[in-house]
Image: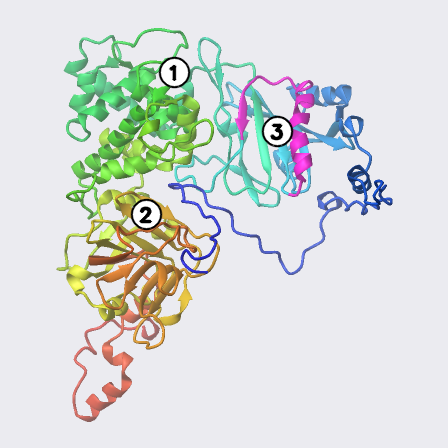
Amino acid sequence: MGGGGGAARPGSRRALGAPSEPPPRSEPAARSPQPAWLSPPPRPPALRASPPRSDPCGRPGVRSVLRAACPPCGPAAMATKIDKEACRAAYNLVRDDGSAVIWVTFKYDGSTIVPGEQGAEYQDFIQQCTDDIRLFAFVRFTTGDAMSKRSKFALITWIGENVSGLQRAKTGTDKTLVKEVVQVLACLLRGRVCQEFPDWPWRGTQNLSAGRCCLPLWKSWMDEQTDKSGSRCWKDFHLLQPCRGFCQIEGKMGNAKSRSGQNACSQFLPEERAEIDRLFDALSSGKHSSNTPHRSFSLQALQSHIGEALPPEMVTRLYDGMQRVNLTGTAKGPSEGVSQEQFTVSMSHLLKGNSEEKSLIILKMISATEGPVKAREVLKFTEDLVGSVVHVLDHRQQLRGWTQKKAPGCPPRVQVLAAQLFSEMKLQEGEKLLGPQQLDCDCDRAMIEDWVFRTPHVAMFLSVVIHRGFLLLCSSLNLSALLPERLVDQGREFESILDVLSVIYLNSHLPREQRHRWHLLFSSELHGHSFAQLCGLITQRGPCVMLLEDHDGHVFGGFASCSWEVKPQFQGDDRCFLFSISPSMAVYTCTGYNDHYMYLNHRQQTIPNGLGMGGQHNYFGLWIDVDFGKGHSKAKPTCTTYNSPQLSAKENFRFEKLEVWAVGDPPESQLAKSKKSILDVDPEAQILLESCGRSCHSQGLREVPEDDE
């Protein structure tokens, strides 16, 4: 069970903002009776094997054993059929606009797919999707306003959580039978599981499977985009919360058509659209746009409007991305300026779009040519994007108390964070882009889309650049979710190990309710090199981030999800993690191998005195010794608790700088303690003062307790 002595259960580095695994379900003590159609099917009787046939030596033959263990099967027994006539009749019923039936299911009757339930309410269909069932469904829904209603259709594949692996695999192949009846255009939307959507444009949800999963109404998330050439593009279908089943949707467009620009406008509220139009009018009416075609603006006009709020290379990238948006679908050269339609579509994709739409603009910001781009070009774009975020926040004086640290002898934090974001890029084979030898490989649109989807900071950084750089729709950006407020007691300012980018990176891995504020608890520069002082200032203060810088310039630390307590036992929970800031950024989460998350002990003779996280006694993933200034990070090959490598440059290191920051709001116990006088803690001292005729000078100065009001 040592930090590296035993076989560690493999853990994984948490992807930036990536979704975490759903917690295990806790079953209630008693359940209310369920309807018969919700109850799982009865378990088939156990198979009774006949005595296996023996080989000449008296041993059971392999074929005999297999024949005894399995029922007779074969292609005829496993083949699935479909009742085409009955299914086509149900399909046409949904297709008929005059029919009240808006959905129908296709279910399994033995090995035959037949029509199932049908209805006129979405909620009735959602109740069909339970954990123990697999089905197909054809659904009609209506979009548009009262003057221009349009019907659209979706083919849905639902596989419940309790469906066996063999049935799951067969459902995928059986779908081809259903598609012989349900004529759907080749527009596939795959269900993606995601926990957090900070910018979720909510327009209504419906509960699925007794509230365990939420599906967005297709009305709002399946609006098609049809350009003049007739090509069709669908948005991604998302699951709002960890899903207990698998859902796949394919869509078919109705009879009406809409232009890309009009569809982009529908993403914005009326007041947002008005603000976007005002900005375009200002850009297109300036003196720098006089040589461009009517109702368009030039690069010089955009540079003049933005000024020094963004770096020149990012302004050029943004202009190129907007100018290269093709609204017609026909091959043509770049336009002489950015038209209003191009500007609106670009803003819609960057601020409101899904990963597919954002990846389209990103590719155009990277290269003027169609097709794949080189990995090194994506890395350079990522560096420009990260640098632009720091630049614009500094220019707008919105760093919220943090600074941009320039560590001598180390790679700039812009390059470090950009490298971390870029490392999440995966090749088509699923391998990550690791090492400079892979910078010349091609990255196509599918890779960029997957990268944007799995790396939320790319989309967040783009929105910061637009909102703060263009001063557009600023009220819709909540900076506290990205960068916390920095609080340091008055008169105690100092130069922190942290900078704005390292804070942004670490803050994204904290629980959401603890991301808005960081309050300094301890700094070796302010409070001295004392382990006793450290213990006195960080205990009972709630969740906190601890980090240090060793003599070799490595910056690393850990997040404690609970208040520190001085005791000889391990503490904390699986929300804790270790991290590295320099020379590279990474977060290492719990493996589940043991529960040695946090340890803090002091003034004991028989067991280690110090602060540790992960591993075991004398072999911690991170250890701060009671002899302040010394520590170790032992991992051979990795820490058993966090799967972290050696964080320091040397296994046994020395340090000068150490900081501890409380995150989120202070715990209630700390708030109550702050309202008390020191005499409230020691009533004997108060009695002694009163017996000597001394008065309590603070009695009339402090606040009246709430109970006495």
Residue under the point 38% across and 72% down: 568
Residue receiving disc 2: 507
Cα separation, mark 1 vs mark 2, equals 35 Å
Amino acid type indicated by mark 3 = Ile
Image location (x, y in percent) of residue 164:
68, 40
Q: Secondary structure at mark 1?
A: loop
Cα separation, mark 1 vs mark 3, equals 31 Å
Q: How many marks?
A: 3
Say which of marks 3 and 2 sits in front.
2
On whether residue 168 falls in the magenta region, the answer is yes
Could you say which is closer to the camera, residue 588 or residue 160? Answer: 588
Q: Quadrant of residue 276?
A: top left
Along the horizontal axis of the image, is 406 left or right of 668? left
Amino acid type indicated by mark 1 = Gly
Query: Earlier along the polypeptide chain: callout 3 or callout 2?
Result: 3
Q: The magenta stretch spans which residues?
A: 162-190
Say which of marks 1 and 2 sits in front.
1
Q: How is the image coloured?
A: rainbow
Residue under the point 43% across and 55% down: 640
Asked if disc 1 and disc 3 are in contact, CB closer than 8 Å, the reply is no
Residue 156 numbered mark, or none: 3
Q: Residue furthest bottom?
A: 691
Q: Secondary structure at mark 3?
A: strand
Q: Secondary structure at mark 2?
A: helix
Residue receiving disc 1: 371
Instruction: Give the quarter of the figure containing the C terminus.
Output: bottom left
Q: Residues within 10 Å of mark 1 (few under 14, many from 20)?
A: few
Q: Residues within 10 Å of mark 2 (few under 14, many from 20)?
A: many
On whether residue 160 falls in the magenta region, the answer is no
Could you say which is closer to the camera, residue 10 or residue 581? Answer: 10
